[in-house]
Image: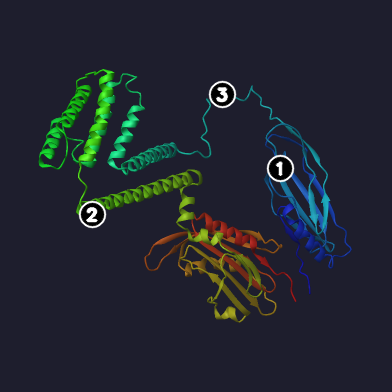
Amino acid sequence: MKRSNKIKYSNINISGLLGYLFFIGFLFSFFTGSAQTSVTSEADSTKIRIGEQINYRIKVNTEEGNLVVFPEGENSFSPLEIIESPEPDTIRSEGNYQLLKEYFLTKFDSGHYVIPSQNIIVQNQTFTTDSIPVEVNDVVVDTTKQKLYPIKPSVEIPPGFSIPDWVWWLLGILGLAGLVAFLIIRKKKKDEAEEELPPYEQAMIELQRLDNSHLLEKREIKEYYSQLSFSARKFLDRKIYDHGLESTTNELVQYLEKEKETGHLNLKDQTIRDFQKILERADLAKFANSRPDVITAKEDRSRTQNIIDELSDSVPEPTEEELMQDKAFLEERARKRKTRRIVFGVLAGVLIIIIGISTLIATKGFTYVKDTYLGHPTKELLEGEWIRSEYGNPPVAVTTPKVLVRGEINIPDESKQMMAGSETFMYGSLLSNFYTTVSTIKFKGEVKFDMQQAIDGIYAELEKQGARNIVMKQEEFTTVNGTKGMKVFGSLDAVNPVTGKSIPNEYVILNFAENGGFEQVTVIYNNGDQYAEEISQRIENSVQLNNLEE
């Protein structure tokens, strides 16, 4: 095996790599030589004014192939702030490699500060730099030359996130509606439970409830007679005459006299007269503000119970046909009650769902709720099981949400003569919401590959696939294992050849020329799709080329 002349480094969190570094350090201990590793640090200035920058450099001298981990993270240089942290530069010197890592630091408060010492991991060793004191001075303003302006009035800055007022109103209304629905349902259940008692037992319960109300002691005669007459009328309505509640006193008396004459009711004339007097006295108390004395009211209560007893005894036993009709009536009433309970249950369930959805929208946002519960194709890709695999020759290791399927690309005949082979693997298409490919080309013998010419050809290739309005940018790119390449990125419009509709997309194309070949990783996704953008970033960070040649 022949090792390539590349330095492997990574700008990742140190704590997350401790176990990994132990294994890598043990592995590379078989290949390390006797060269000494050194780490130094320096700052271009220790005195700055507020807002000025300090160029802090860390130099690492080590042999090729050693893994170097530099400090990263916003808090690494606290209390100073990191403005920029470029990728490390690599210089070969006397058979070893020198890595130069720069940090541009600043501070917006005057005072005396210290650049803290930093830990740099080289292979399986940790090196610590010296701390450096820094003085940050105020900016002196000459008020004789600089005009002074009056202080501007304060402006209230809206918070970054706040729940809209309509959400609170909606929750309040829904809560109130739920409370009202609960009280109504409870009352209906209570009334239904009482209605299921036989008429006579129900009348006795209401009279007993009247005795316990202490309305006579409170001299509330009107309310007392209202409840007394209602108990008698309700018994008549349920047991004898189904218009007992809405009929007038004269109509009820006439009905009882008629039923007595026809023999349907076995009543005494005195009973009908007593019942008439009680109902007339109740009408006067309710509508004419009459106030009978307490003794008379108590006597009327006793007579009412006796009248109900006599009315109950006077009703003949129901025939079999009447019993069947009553049974059918009871079954129909039970069916209606069951239907009402189902309707109220469904309404309560819908109310709970609405409250839950409103709460989720208020806390998580409408887009999150829609994508999570209604589904989103790229969100499902992002949260699915990712797969890491090697594709092509020279091999490219990459992690993707789906396995890439082998495909074909059109290669000119003159290019085929220089190639030992080419392979392409893909998922999706240019018109889908997410599209990614991995392509590799292996050249015959020694070929001087022009990277810039290959990048220039990307524009024409995208146009061939139907892309329009292509905006192209490029910058250097380094993989996690130190392989350098060129990153081409930007935006384009994918035109549907059937509908003619234009779909705005973002794209990223990583290009490498390694191991006598050309490797390319392409990702294209819909503009504004945050899930696809995160997928693209994860794919970029996972790309790794095998830099070892047989």
Q: Is residue 17 left or right of residue 337?
A: right
CB under 8 Å between callouts 1 and 2?
Answer: no
Residue under pointer 3:
149
Residue under pointer 2:
324
Q: Residue furthest right?
A: 34
Mark 1 vs mark 3: which is more N-terminal? Answer: 1
Residue type pointed to by label 3: Tyr
C-alpha span from label 1 to label 3: 31 Å
C-alpha span from label 3 to label 2: 97 Å
Mark 1 vs mark 2: which is more N-terminal? Answer: 1
| Coordinates of residue 316 in the picture (x, y in percent) | 20, 45
Quarter location, residue 152: top right
Residue under pointer 1:
105
User: Which residue is at the front of the view, 537 or 59?
Assistant: 537
Q: Nearer the viewer, mark 3 or mark 2?
A: 2
Q: Nearer the viewer, mark 1 or mark 2?
A: 2
CB under 8 Å between callouts 1 and 3?
Answer: no
Residue type pointed to by label 2: Met
Vertical placement of residue 322 versus 387, above or below: above
Residue 388, visible in the rendered structure? yes
| Coordinates of residue 359 in the picture (x, y in percent) | 47, 44
Element on which disc 2 rests: helix
Element on which disc 3 rests: loop
Q: Residue at the spot x=68%, y=74% of the render? A: 516
